[in-house]
Amino acid sequence: FSLELCEILSRRFEKMSKLQSDALREAISGIMADSKEKNRKFVETIELQIGLKNYDPQKDKRFSGSVKLPHIPRPKMKICMLGDAQHVEEAEKIGLDWMDVEALKKLNKNKKLVKKLAKKYHAFLASEAVIKQIPRLLGPGLNKAGKFPTLVTHQETLESKVNESKAMVKFQLKKVLCMGVAVGNVSMEEKQIFQNVQLSVNFLVSLLKKNWQNVRCLYLKSTMGKCYRVF
């Protein structure tokens, strides 16, 4: 998104949204002040924590959806390229972890090894030639972990796809009525965090069967900081 488009969307969403801008700004300022005061030795991630209501994960359709945020919430997010020769070469140039088909074959569909691989990375990218072979090479492990690779073609640069992946957040209803997604970090500007949170919340609400009537509560929290209720 361009910043202009993000502002237009934010204004539009604000009219429909029950998320109060003042409460959100106050929470973000509180998180940032707390982080500066404590001066921790790492960059804290800011998470949006969501509680839902009037949903039955057993009976109701479990939703799943991803949205690209205007600002990358986790620059250090770990991504692995499952690539053909050309993409492996590109990955090496930009310092991105990679595995080729031979390396994937060595996992031999071993459930434990595939699970370990899924845990090691936040997301996976894959070349067209490799993505078709993933069910055969790895079984359903990555899919079960909600980390099935995103396709990368040779018409786009690998670096732009990596940045796009880092800006994506995924909302997925599993067995419990709560979830959390990274929406920023304490090195960002408050306005950037505000835009990310607004877009995340309104996208989530659009996935819910009764929209805002399904939202019990929303909290913002940094890795080591306290929770701030924003709804």
Image (cartoon, grey):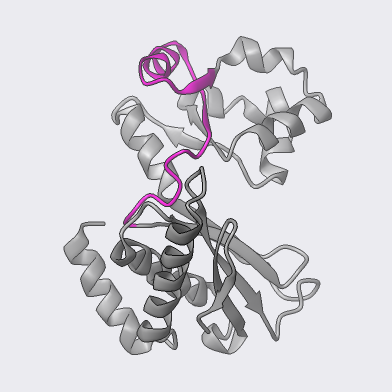
Task: Examine the rendering and report whether any part of residue 120 can be seen.
Answer: yes
Range of residues picked out in magenta: 70-98
Q: Quadrant of the N terminus?
A: bottom left
Instruction: Determine if the magenta segment contains residue 84.
Output: yes
Q: How many marks?
A: 0
Q: Residue at x 51, y 43 (%)?
A: 41
Left or right, 9 with reference to 140: left
Residue 60 rendering spot, x and y as whole percentages: 72, 75
Instruction: Determine if the magenta segment contains residue 78.
Output: yes
Q: Residue at x 20, y 61 (%)?
A: 3
Residue 146 rendering spot, x and y as whole percentages: 64, 47
Q: Residue at x 76, y 72 (%)?
A: 57
Residue 50 occupies quadrant? bottom right
Looking at the image, residue 9 lies above or below residue 142:
below
Task: Examine the rendering and report whether any part of residue 66 can be seen.
Answer: no
Q: Nearer the viewer, residue 97 or 157?
A: 97
